[in-house]
Amino acid sequence: MARQKSADMGVGAMNKRKILQAAEKCFAQFGFKGTAVQKIADEAGLPKTNVLYYFKTKQDLYVAVLQETLSLWNSQFDRATVDDDPAEVLASYITEKMEVSRTHPLASRIFAMEIINGAPNLNGYFDEDHASWMNGRISVIEGWISVGKLQPLDPEHLLYNIWACTQHYADFSTQITRLRGKKMVKSDYEHATKQLITVLLTGCGLEVPQTLKELESVEE
Amino acid sequence: MARQKSADMGVGAMNKRKILQAAEKCFAQFGFKGTAVQKIADEAGLPKTNVLYYFKTKQDLYVAVLQETLSLWNSQFDRATVDDDPAEVLASYITEKMEVSRTHPLASRIFAMEIINGAPNLNGYFDEDHASWMNGRISVIEGWISVGKLQPLDPEHLLYNIWACTQHYADFSTQITRLRGKKMVKSDYEHATKQLITVLLTGCGLEVPQTLKELESVEE
DNA sequence: CAAGAAGCAGACCACTTGGTCTACATTACC
DNA sequence: GGTAATGTAGACCAAGTGGTCTGCTTCTTG
């Protein structure tokens, strides 16, 4: 079945990868409806038929791409507890999310469009997982508040704010680039990350952790 | 030419309005490519031909819708100067932007998609206007910093953060609604606005203005 | 009332596009 | 080596869609 080929990947697996990558690029720029299968095929350097060979329908392919982007949502924050330091945890979370925006802007954009379009391809399981993750995080933050590590605030909106600010750099990079006249590079992201952490943490009444100085980036 | 009809509007003008509204709804949900002119016509209760009668092409219609959304971007912040109080100005700006998200979520979503898609329909004039607005605001904020009204920070990213947090409530309302299990109502927005102002202003080292208590909403 | 303008709407066309059919090539495995 | 699975690819089709053509009704105005 799956045989070894170039770089321990079968021909099929390799083509699938190429297709998924090409599809990500197209869907992120033109959306689901706006992307022709032919375009993806061209981008992947394959005839259209082969794309449909590996993915029965355009929608199947789209869902596969979407599924991949969701895997990026995992974070260290997932495992944080009341015993952890809120400043550290939130600073790391923001850093991670900014890194995702920098290194995977296409994924962020696909997710954003999916949501804007009413999330027609995110099934109930996603909702459940997402909501339970959310509730878990809210509990932790409420824990911090009740033990006095964090001043009272609504955890829900804090999370929304973090998502908004970090994802904005991926989703709206076109606007940002045009305003600045040049693309944001890694150092710009670091600068933005540092300020965002400072503003949000200070805004929550937290001390900005010293480790921020050497903000090691989660390289990709 | 334009004659008076129902409610001081010619037949043509009234139809145009209906079409623009229907188009806004469709474009916001399905994007440009994903919206069929027929769909807009149905939504507006007119035959497709009439839509094309009032707007030569689908793209013309789309640009008209987009243009309308841009008019919502105007704000009191446009006229702020160094002499104003940063806390007041920023709090008002955030409040205004949150109100736009609440009362015109479709417009926000259309703009978001346009940007995500690389802003193919925003011509150079928009860029220029936008950039000069941005520079003006940055100057004011830098002015505040240099006279000691505001602690040093990068004004550019502060603005991005404000846009991100406020627009998020419109663009990602699907996600938010699913997470909460119910739609955000006006009081939820007020709550979110209050916290956002508190966090951001405190994060910038500003005192939260007392007027926040009676946060009069810019009703629509 | 006449005539032109504005508005209305069915029929129609050209083209894009998702997806299928069919046939051929290559590889894996007994 | 034979055979079955996997992969490749051109030809093709049916549906959807943007936009035009043509002819009509209604309104406005001199």
Image (cartoon, coloured by chain):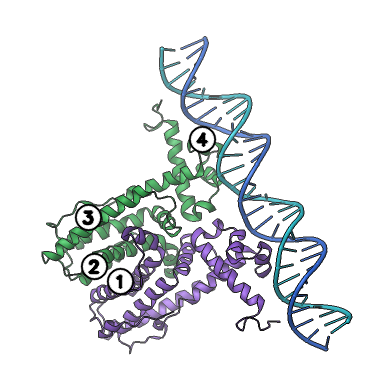
Chain colours: A green, B purple, C cyan, D blue
**Is the Cβ of the residue at disc 3 closer than 8 Å to that at disc 2?**
no
Q: Are dots 4 and 2 in contact, CB under 8 Å?
A: no
Residue at 39% x, 68% y is: B167
Q: Nearer the viewer, mark 4 or mark 2?
A: 2
Residue A215 visible at all? no
Kindly identify which residue carries mark 4: A53
Q: Are marks 4 and 3 on the same chain?
A: yes
Q: Secondary structure at mark 3?
A: helix
Residue A176 is left or right of residue B202, and the answer is right
Question: Mark 3 vs mark 1: same chain?
Answer: no
Name the quadrant containing residue B44.
bottom right
- Is B187 located above or below residue B178 in the figure? below
Please report whichever mark, 3 or 2, sits nearer to the chain's N-terminal start.
3
Of the numbered discs 4 and 2, the one sitting upstream in the chain is 4
Question: What is the CA distance from the residue labelled 4 to the residue labelled 2?
Answer: 49 Å
Position of D30 relative to A203 (above/below): below
Kindly identify the amino acid type of the residue bearing the numbered disc 1. Ala
Give the label on residue A136, or none.
3
- At 61% across and 63% down in the image, what residue appears? B41
Q: Which residue is mark 1?
A: B192
Q: Circle 1 sits in a helix, a strand or a loop, which is it?
A: helix
Q: Is disc 4 in contact with disc 3, using a CB cutoff of under 8 Å?
A: no
